[in-house]
Amino acid sequence: MKTQTASAVRIINAPADLVYKLIADYRNTHPLILPKPYFLSLDVEEGGFGEGTIIRFQMRILGKTRSFQALITEPEPGCVLQETDLSTNISTTFTVLSLGYKNHAKVTIMTVLRGHGWIGRLLAKFMLQKIYAQELTLLAGLAEMVSQPMQASSENKTLSISSQ
């Protein structure tokens, strides 16, 4: 079966572990990174953080509203989080990598699309890439906002320790 891959990548100015936690927290922070014109709802049915969480959400794409139920797994805890739709078995993967700098993470969102003919896959690919780019922008804003007080706090501690 032929496939199309929809993906988006962004460098975020925040620690990779913080960025991963923001994505994995489906009760509190994950809803904040979903672009509202496309994601109509997100409900946690089980769990709420990472592995074993089950979510139900609605998306509007190309004028059609679709409902999904997904199981969250962590193939590589702290680095790779996967949402697998329970009816289609299609997975969306979030990969968060530290770039070796204390406060920089590379985040990739990727879905491999199957079925629906090549035109349908191609349209879905371009729409999802647009949505994922917006999602990464929202994630970057949230992560940078949350990490700023942490960075300032650690800088202040460093300054006070060195001044004694």
Image (spheres, rainbow, N blue to C red):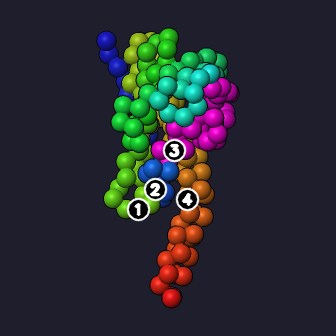
Q: Which residues are magenta?
A: 19-44
Q: Residue furthest bottom?
A: 164
Q: Residues within 10 Å of mark 2 (few under 14, many from 20)?
A: many
Mark 4 residue type: Ser
Q: Horizontally, is 136 left or right of 5 in the view? A: right
Name the secondary structure under disc 1. loop
Along the line of sight, the residue nearer the viewer: 156 or 91: 156
- N-terminal of the two: label 2 or label 4? 2
Q: CA distance from mark 3 to mark 4?
A: 12 Å
- N-terminal of the two: label 1 or label 2? 2
| As drawn, 158 above or below 82 | below
Q: Are marks 3 and 1 in contact (CB under 8 Å)?
A: no
Mark 2 residue type: Pro
Label at residue 21 = 3
Q: Are marks 2 and 4 in contact (CB under 8 Å)?
A: yes
Q: CA distance from mark 1 to mark 2?
A: 6 Å
Mark 3 residue type: Lys
Mark 1 residue type: Lys
Image location (x, y in percent) of residue 145: 60, 57
Q: CA distance from mark 3 to mark 1?
A: 16 Å
Along the line of sight, the residue nearer the viewer: 146 or 93: 146
Asked whether residue 26 is in view, the answer is yes
Q: Residues within 10 Å of mark 3 (few under 14, many from 20)?
A: some
Name the secondary structure under disc 2. loop
Q: Which residue is mark 2?
A: 15
Q: CA distance from mark 3 to mark 2?
A: 10 Å
Q: Horizontally, is 91 left or right of 130 in the view? A: left
Image quadrant in which the N terminus is located: top left
Q: Which residue is mark 1?
A: 102
Q: Quadrant of residue 45?
A: top right
Image location (x, y in percent) of residue 117: 41, 12
Image location (x, y in percent) of residue 93: 42, 32
